[in-house]
Image (tube, helix red, strand yellow):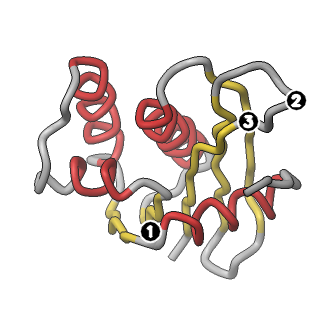
Amino acid sequence: RPLLSYAALERTVDEAGGVQLGYVLRDAGGVLVDRKVVGYGGAEEDANYVALIYGLLKALEKGVEDVVVRGSSVEVTMQLSGRWKPRRRAQSVLNSTATELMSYFTSRLETSLENEARDLVAESLGIVQTT
């Protein structure tokens, strides 16, 4: 199955505040289909949703119908699965958008260790993280 990984990465100290967010879309054979990284000035929880939404839109554009979604945020994964409710209005709106987009796919959410997904996205995007 194709794999969509998404993450929000805190910017390094030498850059302006905010968050870097990105996604990596791979086909069923693991070949890179698309990747993106952008800056985001909002909360990291929101940035995870935005990264997921960007990735889902790209998967739709590429004609993907079946996808495994692997996130870097346990909070977002739990909210998308319905186990937790979004805490803020902005999260609720982003959650609704992501849920609607996911309905276009036969998809499976995977909960992964936060650093595992972040490292995957960082490596694929050529981002060096500082700890």
In the image, residue 6 above or below residue 113: above
- Mark 1–mark 3 distance (CA, rounded to whole Å): 27 Å
Which mark is in front, 2 or 3?
A: 2
Which amino acid type corresponds to the residue marked 2 in the rendered image?
Asp
Which amino acid type corresponds to the residue marked 3 in the rendered image?
Arg
Q: Which residue is identified by label 3?
A: 11
In the image, residue 29 above or below residue 17: below
Q: Which residue is identified by label 2?
A: 14
Q: Position of residue 52 (x, y in %)?
A: 48, 43
- Mark 2–mark 1 distance (CA, rounded to whole Å): 34 Å
Q: Residue at x 79, y 38 (%)?
A: 12
Which mark is in front, 1 or 3?
A: 3
- Mark 2–mark 3 distance (CA, rounded to whole Å): 8 Å
Is residue 99 or residue 73 the one in the foreground?
Answer: 73
**Residue 97 in the figure: left or right of residue 59:** left
Marks 1 and 3 close (CB-CB < 8 Å): no
Q: Residue at x 44, y 62 (%)?
A: 69
Q: Which residue is identified by label 1?
A: 68
Question: How busy is the neighbourhood of tag 1: few (under 14 within 10 Å), some, or many (20 plus)?
Answer: some
Question: How busy is the neighbourhood of tag 3: few (under 14 within 10 Å), some, or many (20 plus)?
Answer: some
Question: Mark 1 or mark 3: which comes first in sequence?
Answer: 3
Q: Position of residue 88 (x, y in %)?
A: 22, 23
Secondary structure type for disc 3 = loop
Which amino acid type corresponds to the residue marked 1 in the rendered image?
Val
**Residue 128 in the figure: left or right of residue 92:** right
Secondary structure type for disc 1 = strand
In the image, residue 83 above or below residue 90: below
